[in-house]
């Protein structure tokens, strides 16, 4: 079996995935416009760093996309589609890019001879490093089956959502509006409890033991906030992008989503308050500042 894999985009999520493939004997080809992101891999005997995504069509069986925006997906898919590919060549989109841009990319690549699998992942940087991501998958049966060796490296759960590109994206943006809404809500709740004199660690323990338990109380706060590291690995502007994809889809489908719009407003406030490039867990600091209870080193 060919064990050649390409990555377009070597950011916070892709970097630990690349390490896992290398450790398991795969030959990995990388493309990223920021040289620093591929620097640690440049001298590895199993890694080749390319300047152009077009090179991947001739060198890899699988090309994983780990991209920040729908626009980036459009640009990369357009560049790949301009290349005459060989068979079998499968493009796997692990990014959160929304259903509309994903369907357009899938159609563009299919017309150029590529198979396309929609496979956004959930689980954060820690999950990427541990190989415990949840992979949400939609696409035709044959290419999805062919991707099983790839999914085995990065995920502990592979959930088949449907047979069409974009269906997995629908589930991913639904997941993210819940996850990021829970983070914002927990930040708001603990800003209030701390203002009332309850230390954050006690508040989180109580919330996590009660019916308010969620992914923020069980994972993000204990690992990334109470530790003082604020290193979940996903920026606030990425959070705003993801929740906005949900409300855009809702508008397209004619579905009223007032709660999701409130979540968008929270994350827009975080970005407008200067946290856009910072870790999404810094929304906690924003709420603490608004409550007047941030520590001096948080100012």
Image (tube, grey):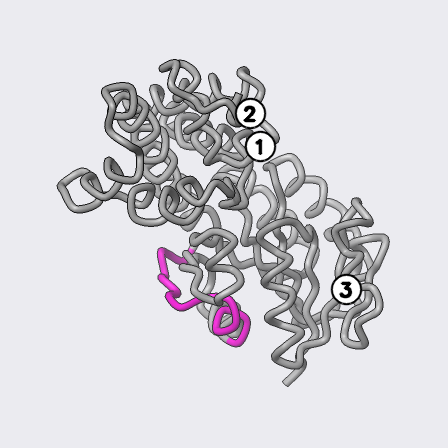
> Looking at the image, can residue 270 be seen?
yes
| Image coordinates for residue 247, horizontal then vertical, percent | 39, 26
> Looking at the image, can residue 256 be seen?
no
Work out whether 180 lies above or below 286. Answer: below
The magenta stretch spans residue 150: yes
Q: CA distance from mark 2 to mark 1?
A: 5 Å
Work out which quarter of the rendered image holds the N terminus and state it: bottom right
Nearer to us of marks 1 and 3 is 1
Labels 1 and 3: the sequence-earlier one: 3
Label 2 with label 1: CB-CB less than 8 Å? yes
* Residue at which label 2 appears: 275
* Residue at which label 3 appears: 41
Q: Determine the residue located farthest toward the bottom in the rendered image.
A: 1
Looking at the rendering, the stretch of residues picked out in magenta corresponds to 149-163
Q: For the point 16% across and 46% down, which residue is it?
A: 209
Q: Is residue 260 left or right of residue 57?
A: left
Q: For the point 53% across and 27% down, which residue is it?
A: 297
Mark 2 surroundings: few (<14), some (14-19) or many (≥20) residues within 10 A: many
Work out whether 189 lies above or below 67. Answer: above
| Image coordinates for residue 51, horizontal then vertical, percent | 86, 53
Residue 222: which disc? Answer: none
* Residue at which label 1 appears: 278
Work out whether 233 lies above or below 142. Answer: above
Q: Secondary structure at mark 3?
A: helix
Q: Nearer the viewer, residue 239 or 282?
A: 282
């Amino acid at each position: 079996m060919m064990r050649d894999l390409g990555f377009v985009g070597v950011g916070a999520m892709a970097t630990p995935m690349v390490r896992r493939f290398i450790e398991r004997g795969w030959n990995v080809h990388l493309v990223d416009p920021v040289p620093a992101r591929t620097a640690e891999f440049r001298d590895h005997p199993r890694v080749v760093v390319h300047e152009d995504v077009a090179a991947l069509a001739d060198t890899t069986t699988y090309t994983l996309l780990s991209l920040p925006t729908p626009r980036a997906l459009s640009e990369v898919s357009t560049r790949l589609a301009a290349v005459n590919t060989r068979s079998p060549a499968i493009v796997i989109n692990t990014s959160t890019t929304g259903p509309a841009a994903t369907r357009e990319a899938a159609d563009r690549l299919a017309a150029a001879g590529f198979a396309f699998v929609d496979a956004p992942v959930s689980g954060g940087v820690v999950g990427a490093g541990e190989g415990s991501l949840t992979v949400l998958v939609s696409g035709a049966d044959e290419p999805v089956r062919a991707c099983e060796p790839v999914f085995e490296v990065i995920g502990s759960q592979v959930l088949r959502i449907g047979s069409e590109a974009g269906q997995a994206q629908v589930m991913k943006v639904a997941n993210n509006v819940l996850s990021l809404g829970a983070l914002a809500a927990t930040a708001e709740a603990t800003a209030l409890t701390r203002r009332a004199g309850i230390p954050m660690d006690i508040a989180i323990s109580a919330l996590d033991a009660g019916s308010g338990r969620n992914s923020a109380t069980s994972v993000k706060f204990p690992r990334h906030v109470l530790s003082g590291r604020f290193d979940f690995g996903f920026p606030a502007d990425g959070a705003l992008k993801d929740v906005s994809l949900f409300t855009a889809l809702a508008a397209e489908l004619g579905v009223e989503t007032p709660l999701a719009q409130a979540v968008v407003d929270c994350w827009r406030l975080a970005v407008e308050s200067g946290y856009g490039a910072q870790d999404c867990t810094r929304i906690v600091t924003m709420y603490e500042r608004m409550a007047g209870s941030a520590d001096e080193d948080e100012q």
